[in-house]
Image (tube, rainbow, N blue to C red):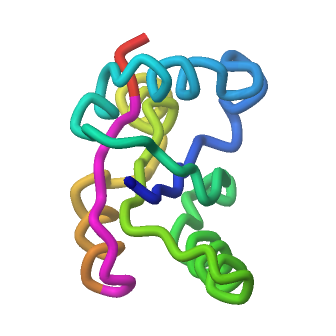
Amino acid sequence: MARIAIMSCQKIKDASCIGCIKCFKAMDLKEGEFSRYADNIDVIAMSDCGDCPGLVMPKLALVKDVADHYGRDFDTVHIGTCIVKAVQTAACPINLEKLAGMIENVMGKQVVIGTHSY
């Protein structure tokens, strides 16, 4: 079973993508970046980036601490499509490749950039 955490854009989440329904749809249908999982997906956590200028690492560290406390560790972090779109269209300052490398190196988690294509 895939045990994942999803990081979303604080400015877009619940503004143009209400309730992360697109991510949950893609998970259910195994579409987009969720097509890589043959087994079930266990969403351990969903959180946002911490707002601009991009406080993802401290926010994700807090998510990991809470997940560890409750015995709910995750293996993979998905950087939500909303963050990808914010970088591409809204001058979000996050460098996606650098962020992915930091998460992998500092936290030892696999990183997937994106969640779905809608």
Tell me the quarter of the picture where residue 107 sits: bottom left
* Residue at image coords 48%, 32%: 86
x and y, in percent, of residue 60 in the image: 57, 71
Tell me the quarter of the picture where residue 39 sits: top left
x and y, in percent, of residue 31 in the image: 33, 19
* Residue at image coords 31%, 82%: 108
Q: Residue furthest top?
A: 118
- Count of numbered marks: 0
Location of residue 18 with respect to 97 vertically, above or below: above
Q: Give, as a single range, the part of the protein colored magenta.
A: 106-115
x and y, in percent, of residue 92 in the image: 48, 42
Location of residue 56 with respect to 25 vertically, above or below: below
Location of residue 20 with respect to 77 vertically, above or below: above
Horizontal arrangement in the rendering, residue 79 relative to residue 63 (left or right): left
Nearest the eye: 83 or 18: 18
80 inside magenta stretch: no
Location of residue 2 with respect to 29 vertically, above or below: below
> For the N terminus, which image quadrant?
bottom left
Horizontal arrangement in the rendering, residue 81 relative to residue 98 (left or right): right
* Residue at image coords 23%, 70%: 101
Horizontal arrangement in the rendering, residue 101 relative to residue 61 (left or right): left
> For the C terminus, which image quadrant?
top left
x and y, in percent, of residue 75 in the image: 38, 68
